[in-house]
Amino acid sequence: MTRFNRYALILGMIATMILSAGAFAAENPCNPCGGEATNPCNPCNPCSGMKHFGIDDPRGRDVLTFDSKAPLEKIVGTTSKITGSVQVNPKDIMKGLKASFSLDLASLKTGIDKRDEHMRDNFLETAKYPQAMLTIDKVTKASDNMLMDGKTLTVDAEGTLSLHGAKNAVHLKDITITYFDESEATKGRLPGDLLIINGGFSLNLPDYNIEVPQFIFLKLAETIKVSVDLAGSTATTGVANPCNPCNPCAGVNPCNPCAGENPCNPCNPCGGANPCNPCNPCGE
């Protein structure tokens, strides 16, 4: 075999390996979500540029407030039993920002116990519908694209509110988001990097099958204003964080190669000879 033929053979083998690798990556069970850079649920690239913030303050400093202004009465209710998670690309919040928040409706307090009981039993029916769920699907407008330490951004977003067995689109305007790198000062609120979220939206009770009787109409408005003051932390336990090597996508997510039973060994999270090893994802 001539030198030229040997070179041609080597080049051909290299090209075949590259093409095969590309095809293998797309279908490789060791990389359950596919791709090397686009999917945060990819144990070969678990973070993919995203930051994940959990909302679950053990000291109850996250607050949701609702405000009803009827002709004869103003009612203000609050709760701190709100949890959630936010996924965001710090370099471009317009790309990939997702969030979800869950509210314990039975925990809402208006300052009058009898009124709270009436609200739970006759309007919200919390025994049947114990939670409200708000998801943020996309940011439609932002004052700036990048998160920077101490900087506040203003955003508009679109999402979905599930309440009382109904689900409707919601539009959120002028929501403020402030990001903080972890520091001695921020640890007083929560450990980890923080994302402070302030804003709100309005909801129309009949849209969620909550009818206001005529005799109550003068005391309870059909349109309610909702506002939140929340702090998300990258260190909050239980967050569905693909950047956590002990449970890359949390719980039942199929992108978690151990399906929630991960012994937290980042070099071989499934134990033994399992090929789904993010340090050696193809088990060679």
Image: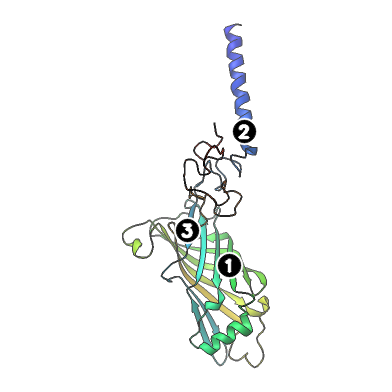
Say if mark 3 contacts mark 2, CB within 8 Å: no
Which mark is drawn over residue 134? 1
In this rendering, the answer to whether 151 lies above or below 73 is above
Quadrant location, the C terminus: top right
- Residues 283 and 164: in front is 283
Q: How many marks?
A: 3
Q: Is residue 144 visible?
A: no
Q: Counting residues from the N terminus, which is met first, the one under dot 1 or under dot 2?
A: 2
Give the image quarter of residue 29: top right
Residue at the image position 31 percent from the left and 59 percent from the top: 184
Q: Amino acid at mark 2?
A: Gly
Q: Counting residues from the N terminus, which is met first, the one under dot 3 or under dot 2?
A: 2
Residue pushed farthest top?
2
Percent x, y for residue 76? 50, 83
Residue at the image position 59 percent from the left and 53 percent from the top: 253
Q: Secondary structure at mark 3?
A: strand
**Residue on which disc 3 sits:** 53
Residue pushed farthest front?
272
**Residue on which disc 2 sits:** 22
Around disc 1, counting alpha carbons within 10 Å, would you say few (fewer than 14), some (14 to 19), or many (20 or more)? many
- Residues 29 and 19: in front is 29
Q: Is residue 90 visible?
A: yes
Q: Secondary structure at mark 2?
A: helix
Residue at the image position 66 percent from the left and 69 percent from the top: 167
Q: Amino acid at mark 3?
A: Phe
